[in-house]
């Protein structure tokens, strides 16, 4: 076996943990080949795996993020314009391990500081959609080629989406209270290593406290799909050969409020049912970037025309990305 493949299986997919859970259940007399036993194995293994990866990755990402607090991010973006500003805004969004609702206060802060509207929307699209943690988590389900391609496509979607909104000159569609909110320009103290570690640990605790329920729900749904829904049924609705699979996945994902950590076990179960790669990624992107609660929150700070434009651009982009991934999936390494 290729050493890199072995490392990916053991470190990210945690095959050793799957084998350990299976052995423990069999020792207790549980038949893991049965539907009930398979569901129990899936639930225990995926729950432990996701929380181990989640805690480790959020700590690392938060350590990096401690170098880019909102004030510094605003200063970096403040001196840029055009495509470069949108690109940097999208890239900085990858350093914020936030769900879409958590990104909206930052959007308000950036807008009130006078940053171009298109740049703030590039950040708003990228922040929940793509981050360093999601890249590693995607690699644990698929492989590094798929994970890196997803990240690149997500950043491109954020840049194009923000650029289109900027070109439409819809600054008048932002609620007045946002632009009237004063932006503080304070001198930031330099954090020491111990302070960065404390900050990272606090982020781990905060994010796990916010997402643990969604992770458990996602694992439960994944276990049900994996062991109780026949592959033929899933393929009939979401098979890669069905033209409607990607739009349906997006429509199903929009009402769900979760981040990528909660959608990961569902994606893992759909992979086992041979659902198209683009369909799975479109579902995950819709959940993370277009959740109904985040749209309700965003409606408080922007007017209906801007909200509708943002929604339409992102939906169209996600559907396009899903169709693209379904088309190129045969060319990518198997997962």
Image (cartoon, rainbow, N blue to C red):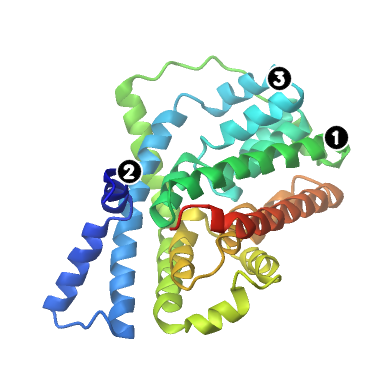
The residues tagged by marks 2 and 3 sit, at their Cα atoms, a distance apart of 33 Å
Front residue (pair 225, 71): 225
Count of numbered badges drawn on the protein: 3
Left/right placement of residue 49 relative to residue 109 reads: left
Q: Quadrant of the C terminus?
A: bottom left
Q: Quadrant of residue 320?
A: bottom right
Which SS class for mark 2? Answer: helix
Vertical placement of residue 16 versus 201, above or below: below
- Position of 60 with respect to 91 (left or right) is left
**Location of residue 72 in the rendering, given as x and y in whole percent from the top left corner:** 56, 21
Q: Nearer the viewer, residue 303 or 182?
A: 303
Q: Answer with left or right where residue 142 lies relative to residue 299.
A: left
Q: Vertical placement of 114 versus 17: above or below? A: above
Q: Quadrant of residue 190?
A: top left
**Which residue in the structure is indicated by mark 1?**
167
- Which is more toward the observer, 54 or 135? 135
Q: Whole-percent x and y of residue 239?
A: 59, 73
- Residue at (30, 53) in percent of width and height: 9
Q: Residues within 10 Å of mark 1 (few under 14, many from 20)?
A: few
Binning the other alpha carbons within 10 Å of mark 3 as few (below 14), some (14 to 19) or many (20 upward) gives some
Of the numbered discs 2 and 3, the one sitting upstream in the chain is 2
Alpha-carbon distance for marks 1 and 3? Answer: 16 Å
Estimate the spatial distance between the alpha carbons at disc 2 and disc 1, rounded to whole Å.
Answer: 40 Å
Which residue is situated farthest in the left direction here?
27
Residue at the (30%, 51%) spot, across then down: 52
* Residue ID for mark 3: 80
Q: Residue at x 47, y 83 (%)?
A: 229
Checking the image for residue 56, the label placed there is: 2
């Amino acid at each position: 076996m290729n050493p890199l493949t072995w490392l990916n299986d053991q470190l990210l997919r945690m095959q050793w943990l799957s084998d350990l859970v299976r052995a423990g259940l069999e020792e207790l007399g549980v038949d893991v080949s049965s539907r009930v036993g398979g569901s129990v194995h899936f639930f225990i293994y995926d729950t432990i795996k996701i929380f181990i990866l989640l805690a480790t990755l959020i700590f690392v990402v938060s350590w990096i993020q401690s170098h880019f607090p909102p004030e510094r991010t605003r200063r970096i973006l403040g001196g840029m314009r055009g495509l470069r500003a949108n690109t940097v805004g999208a890239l900085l969004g990858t350093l914020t391990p936030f769900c879409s609702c958590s990104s909206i206060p930052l959007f308000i802060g950036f807008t009130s500081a006078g940053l171009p509207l298109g740049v703030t929307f590039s950040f708003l699209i990228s922040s929940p959609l793509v981050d360093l943690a999601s890249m590693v988590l995607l690699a644990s389900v698929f492989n590094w080629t798929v994970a890196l391609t997803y990240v690149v496509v997500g950043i491109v979607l954020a840049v194009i989406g923000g650029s289109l909104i900027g070109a439409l000159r819809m600054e008048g569609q932002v609620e007045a209270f946002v632009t009237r909110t004063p932006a503080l320009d304070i001198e930031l103290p330099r954090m020491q290593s111990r302070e960065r570690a404390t900050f990272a640990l606090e982020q781990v605790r905060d994010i796990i406290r916010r997402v643990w329920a969604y992770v458990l729900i996602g694992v439960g749904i994944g276990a049900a799909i994996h062991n109780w829904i026949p592959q033929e049924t899933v393929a009939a609705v979401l098979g890669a050969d069905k033209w409607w699979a990607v739009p349906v996945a997006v429509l199903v994902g929009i009402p769900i409020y979760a981040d990528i950590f909660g959608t990961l076990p569902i994606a893992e179960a759909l992979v086992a049912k041979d659902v198209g790669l683009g369909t799975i990624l479109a579902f995950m992107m819709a959940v993370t970037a277009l959740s109904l609660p985040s749209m309700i929150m965003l409606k408080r700070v922007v007017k209906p025309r801007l909200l509708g434009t943002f929604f339409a651009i992102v939906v169209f982009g996600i559907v396009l990305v899903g169709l693209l991934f379904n088309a190129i999936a045969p060319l990518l390494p198997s997962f």
